[in-house]
Image (cartoon, helix red, strand yellow):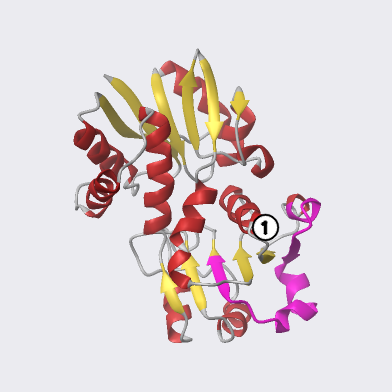
Amino acid sequence: MKKFCIFGNPVAHSKSPQMQNAGFKYLNFNGFYEKHYLENGDLIKEEFLENSYSGANITVPHKEKAFQNADIVKGIAQKIEAVNTYILEDDKIVAYNTDAPGFLKAIESFGKISKVLILGAGGTAKAIALALQEQNIDITILNRSNNKLNFFKNHNIKAFSFDDFEKDIFKNEKFDLVVNSTSAGLKDDFLPVPKEILENILSKSSFAFDCIYGKITPFLALAKDLDNKIKDGEDMLLYQGVLAFELFTNTKASLSLIEAMRKGLKSNKN
């Protein structure tokens, strides 16, 4: 039996195992997918090999460390410098990023989007920003501090810290979509950005998306109160998971397989 996992910290909340295992069951694929709590991202390659995994997904906060530890990086992940999927091929760890196409699929229901504000500057933000940039969408990054902003500036993406944003002309801009890529609201009741800044932004936007799934976070609750159409990260999780599943099993996902994985995702098992 082939073994797969999701690496993360935290990882107890993850619904990836029930989604991926539902896919394995549907295909009668001889595989099992489990959670793997990993505190130190520097050890991800070692842990992957020691546990004889055939593939893995990577969630916060290890996507950038996973990129650094991979033997081979393919596709848009080379630009993003963050990965969420590992595959073992010929004793080499090959890494991909399925977050980017998964996100684009997830926001299709919003319709045409021209300007997007992304909150946060981690691996997920990088994936989303570069995916949107490839669609010629205007992007701005807003992060607590300046220390991760050079990546975005080097890719000609506007990027600000909270202090810069408050002083800058961009605080008066209207964004079609605001995306929370941070972990604020996952294990707590925090907002990703100070409330006074966020209220100003969301009062003028139309759509709000949170990469956190399975709950109405404080960010989404505030966005809804300010008349935004809201969406959590369930569809992003599903579609990035389907793309990872295709890599795990070397199978092109049918609509019925995708629905089996969605049903697994929505089940109460955890």
Within the image, what quadrant is residue 37 found in?
top left
Name the residue rendered at 46%, 23% in the picture: 48
Where is residue 123 shown, x and y percent of the image? 59, 47
Q: In which quadrant of the rendered image does the N terminus lie?
A: top left
Task: Judge left or right: residue 89 versus residue 79.
Answer: left
Task: Judge left or right: residue 231 versus residue 82.
Answer: left
Residue 155 lies within the magenta run:
yes
Where is residue 235 shown, x and y percent of the image? 38, 57
The amino acid pointed to by label 1 is Gln
Number of disc labels: 1
> 124 and 28: which one is in front?
28
Name the residue rendered at 30%, 43% in the picture: 254
Identify whether 55 is placed above or below 16. above
State the extent of the magenta-drawn residues as a range.
152-179
Residue extending farthest top: 90
Name the residue rendered at 31%, 47% in the picture: 15
Where is residue 209 shown, x and y percent of the image? 48, 67
> Which secondary structure lies at badge 1?
helix
Residue 20 lies within the magenta run:
no
Task: Judge left or right: residue 47 versus residue 171.
Answer: left
Q: Residues within 10 Å of mark 1 (few under 14, many from 20)?
A: some
> 44 and 137: which one is in front?
137
Within the image, what quadrant is residue 94 found in?
top right
Identify whether 210 is placed above or below 2. below
Where is residue 198 shown, x and y percent of the image? 59, 78
Q: Which residue is mark 1?
A: 133
Identify whether 205 is placed above or below 114. below
